[in-house]
Image (spheres, grey):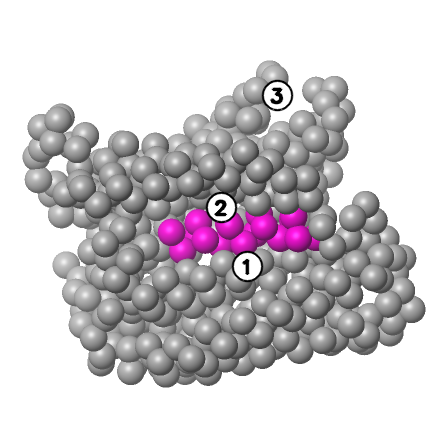
Amino acid sequence: MRARTPFGWRFTAPLLLGSTLNPINSSMIATGLLSIGLDFHLGPGQTASLISVLYLCSAVSQPTMGKLATLFGPRRVFMAGAVILLAAGIVGAAAPGFGFLLLSRALIGIGTSAAYPTAMALVRRRADEHGIGVPARVLGNFSIAAQITTVFGLPLGGLLAGTFGWRALFFVNIPLAVVTFVFTLLGVEKDAPREHQGARALLVSVDIPGIVLFAGTIVSALVFLSGLASPLWWLLPVVAVFGTGLILWERRVAKPLIDVRMLASNRPLQRTYLRQTLSALVVYSVLYGTSQWMEQAAGYSATAVGLILLPLSGLSIVIARVASTRGWVRWPLVIGAVSVVLSALVMQFMDADASIWLLIGMSLLLGCANGFTGFANQATLYVQAPAAEIAVASGLYRTFAYLGAIFSSSLIGITFGRQATDAGLHTLGWVLGGIGVLLVLITVLDRRIPATTAAAAGGSRA
């Protein structure tokens, strides 16, 4: 029986909660790395692997979970992800050695990666069943949820680790997984009965060779991008071999993990992935780059830096709500790209003696960019991806964001060197300004971006 309100809180709450678990686990672990290193007698380089293993597993698992959702049903895969997260929390909270923590973080990456692509598939299914078109407000809620986790991930991690110790950073996933599972059980309708397949046919449908080739491509690319300050050039031919193998294999199988034929012909979707990668690169470069500069060069405390950057997230949330309520798509992308250029320009006037109001102004401009592009890119993905491919396409959307996030660490390392200086900040600003100009061009010149979600619903999908 259909709900009176198709997107009431009983339906959306577990999907929103599940979709926040990956980004919040990515950020809150940072507060426990020092304590973990002390307990297991490890250095910063070894404990930092707890961050990278989650990124790598997530980047591979997002589209993979989307593929599994098309085979087994999005609700089943969403709930399976919650079960994996529950196991991850138990392993991490009771870990007798560092290896168990790595296993836990890998499982966290896999389990939480099930949420976003399956949530998008569930939203798409319900919208199509009720003839709603593009549920802009719901998509806006997902964008806002991501902003909230950006704000509260580190403070939550600090509170848990400071009060209960670093094991609480893993234990907290146990109640979160249980709540997500139960709420999904009660609020999200069951998937349709699955058509029975033999073991051989099922293995063919899952496309294990495609998953392996995709994993090899993404992992080698991410490792290369993360170390551009001292490039591992031998990884480039590895990326090329895996990537070429992936394309050739996916072109010949009937049910590929990545529908490369569709992706090659869907130019608007390609441009959305490019905008998402560049937007993530800009946001993470500013977040981590300027925060380091404010502490090292300008002498601000960590608390002060957090307060200066708080308007970024606060304004992002407000703008995402306004844009999603109005259903604006094209102009938010244009304004967001222009805001990137302006924030990079402001960075050229920032030095160790700069007024705090100048720093807050830069934060507000980036908040405009983040708020406008976050919702608008998600909306364009929703309308540009074929309905049957929305789960995998949404997973790839997150994977491209990881590419930008990982690349940002190398960009910061190259521009700053060993220490965050005024000169390094200005160089970073010039690079980000160039990226902003590129974003303006590929947005203004792209006539396939709909003006609003209403216009998108009335048009044909590419």
- Point out which mark residue 280 bears: 1
Count up the numbered dots: 3
Quadrant of the frame with the C terminus: bottom left
Q: Secondary structure at mark 2?
A: helix
Q: Are marks 3 and 1 in contact (CB under 8 Å)?
A: no
Which span is picked out in magenta?
396-412
Q: Which residue is mark 2?
A: 22
Q: Amino acid at mark 3?
A: Phe
- At 28% across and 77% down in the image, what residue appears? 456
**Does 94 appear above or below 440?**
above
Q: Residue at x 68, y 73 (%)?
A: 343
In the rendered image, residue 280, in percent from the top left (x then y), is placed at: 55, 59
Q: What is the quadrant of the N terminus in the image?
A: bottom left
Examine the structure image and report whether residue 399 is included in the region drawn in magenta: yes
Quadrant in the rendering for residue 141: bottom left
Q: Is residue 460 above or below residue 89?
A: below
Q: Earlier in the sequence, mark 2 or mark 3?
A: 2
Residue 363: give x, y in percent of width and height: 70, 70
Q: Determine the CA span between mark 3 and mark 1.
A: 30 Å
The numbered dot on residue 98 is 3
Q: Is residue 281 magenta?
A: no
